[in-house]
Image: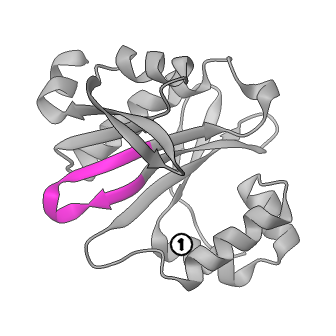
Amino acid sequence: MSLQFEILETPRLLLRTLTPDVYTKVLEDLSDKQLMEFTGYTRPEDIAKERARQAGGLSSYAMTFLYWHALDKETQKVIGSIGYYRIFPEHERGEIGYNIYNEANRRKGYMKELMPIVLAYGFDTVKLHRIEAMISPGNEASIGLIEKFGFVKEGHMREHFKREDSLVYSLLSREWIKHQ
């Protein structure tokens, strides 16, 4: 594939930037097998879901996304993703999400390493004023992570995501500046 990716770097990880235009090209050019390697997904149904998402339109007039695949520097394998799964440019806000795919790579501090870069990118480059996170009430690791970076709990949404509750957190640009 001839696409050039913007790469961000941490001590242990590389972040491969995916915008709607880039990801559309990836989905069009790669076979299912190549896409599994590219994304780090291990199940064919995940690939089918990504292709269906693209067919439905990855972005709309009011919303777009920007996220990164996190690659282990040593192995160059995708271990997870982090980014803004929903950006509303007109409102200067975005919703952050993140995932380490394999249990063996969890609890190693990868998200703690990635979060400052992704938050700074959102506030400084994308010019977001507000970054939101929706977290399952039982996900103590994720709650601890975002609270460490200054996110404030705003509420509890009942049956918000696949009939599961979500805790609503946010971080404003002025809070991020103070937190650094």
Q: Is residue 153 magenta?
A: no
Q: Is residue 88 magenta?
A: yes
For the magenta stretch, what is the residue range? 85-96
Number of numbered markers: 1
Residue denoted by label 1 = 22
Q: Image quarter for residue 130?
A: top left
Q: Position of residue 54 (x, y in %)?
A: 57, 78
Q: Could you classify mark 1 by the number of other residues whose Cα lies within 10 Å: few (under 14), some (14-19), or many (20 or more)?
A: some
Q: Position of residue 159 (x, y in %)?
A: 44, 44
- Is residue 105 rendered to the left or right of residue 153? right
Quadrant for the N terminus in the image: bottom right
Q: Position of residue 84 (x, y in %)?
A: 41, 51
Residue at screen point 79% across, 66% down: 45
Q: Nearer the viewer, residue 88 or 177?
A: 88
Amino acid type of the residue that numbered disc 1 sits on in the rendered structure: Val
Residue at screen point 36% across, 67% down: 64
* Colour mapping: one colour
- Is residue 48 rendered to the left or right of residue 178? right
The majority secondary structure of the magenta stretch comes to strand
In this rendering, the answer to whether 45 lies above or below 103 is below
